[in-house]
Amino acid sequence: MISFSRWLVLILSLGVTGYGLYAYLALPPGTSVHPDMKAAYAAHPGRIVAHVAFSALALAVGPLQFFPALRARRRLHRGLGYLYFLGVMGGGIAGFCTAFIAYGGLVARVGFGMLALVWLWTALAAIHAARRRDFEAHERWALRSFALTFAAVTLRLYMPLFFAAGIAFEDFYPVQAWLCWVPNLILLEWMLLGRAKAQK
Ligand code: HEM
């Protein structure tokens, strides 16, 4: 990742982290979103608050792992890695539970539910690869994991574009539940393939 994109990813990630922590830990859950979402969160506050708190940890810590200067400090990288893993595990399990009450019907619920499962799976694969000291595989899985963590950012970047195109929230929201993560993963796999070809 070139330096500019690292900083951009960090700034966008911290922006969404800050939004999540403020809107869900400082304000009553759902204050800033659609009234139906607010009602669902009011009925099930535990899962959304746990989801936001743990996921915010993953989103804040994850981008730091891509800065070479920090990664070179092995103990720091490992410590931050376990914090990130804790965030993904807590955020993913709570996110999976939250998918059952998500706005946007079955399409949105399946989209978020799948995202939660793939998010958990890629983080487990990254940790597993590091434990067996296969650091090339570890990096690939960690990148896949973060491409999914970054769905929290891409979701919120697409939103104003849909609004600007005059599409109603209830129409685009189920699409977003897929659009926020599938293209991230495809783009990353394409980059990994390019890198593998260049190394041959
Ligand atoms: C990558 C895996 C993730 C999954 C599977 C996931 C899943 C979900 C689901 C199902 C909802 C409920 C949406 C609805 O009510 O319609 C939600 C909401 C939310 N999530 Fe996540 N999420 C993920 C990542 C993150 C991350 C990294 C953050 C960072 C803080 C985050 C912050 C939030 C917030 C703040 C909400 C409330 C809606 C809003 O205010 O925009 N999520 N998430």
Image: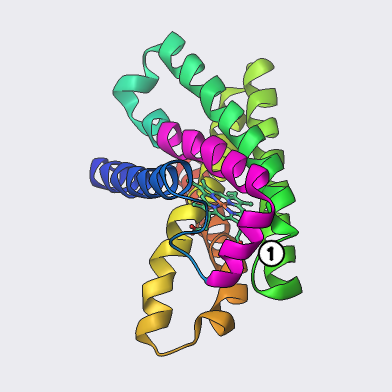
Residue 160's place in the image compared with 18, above or below, is below
Q: Give the camera-side residue of 140 and 104.
A: 104
Q: Residue at x 67, y 45 (%)?
A: 47
Image coordinates for residue 107, horizontal then vertical, percent: 72, 73
Could you say where residue 172 lies in the image, as x and y percent from the top left? 54, 80
Q: Residue at x 64, y 25 (%)?
A: 127
Q: Is residue 52 magenta?
A: yes
**Secondary-structure class at tag 1:** helix
Few, some or many residues within 10 Å of mark 1 (<14, 14–19, 20+)? many
The answer to whether residue 1 is seen in the rendering is no
State the image quarter where residue 72 is shown. top left
Label 1 sits on residue: 111
Residue pictured at 57% horizontal, 43% vertical: 49
Camera sees residue 181: yes
**Residue at the top extreme?**
75
Measured as percent of width and height from the top left, residue 187 is found at 50, 59
Looking at the image, residue 57 lies above or below residue 20: above
Left or right: where 166 falls relative to 79: left
Identify the colour scheme used: rainbow
Mark 1 vs ligand 1: CB under 8 Å? Answer: no
The magenta-colored residue range is 35-62
* Rendered-image quadrant of the N terminus: top left
Q: In this rendered view, identify the residue nearer to me: 38 or 57.
A: 38
Q: Main secondary structure of the magenta part?
A: helix
Question: Which amino acid, by three-letter code, is at mark 1?
Answer: Gly
Task: Tell which of 156 and 49 is nearer to you.
Answer: 49
The image shows residue 98 at horizontal and vertical percentages of: 69, 53
Horizontal placement of 144 versus 28: left or right? right
Q: Residue at x 53, y 46 (%)?
A: 149
89 sits left or right of 165 in the view: right
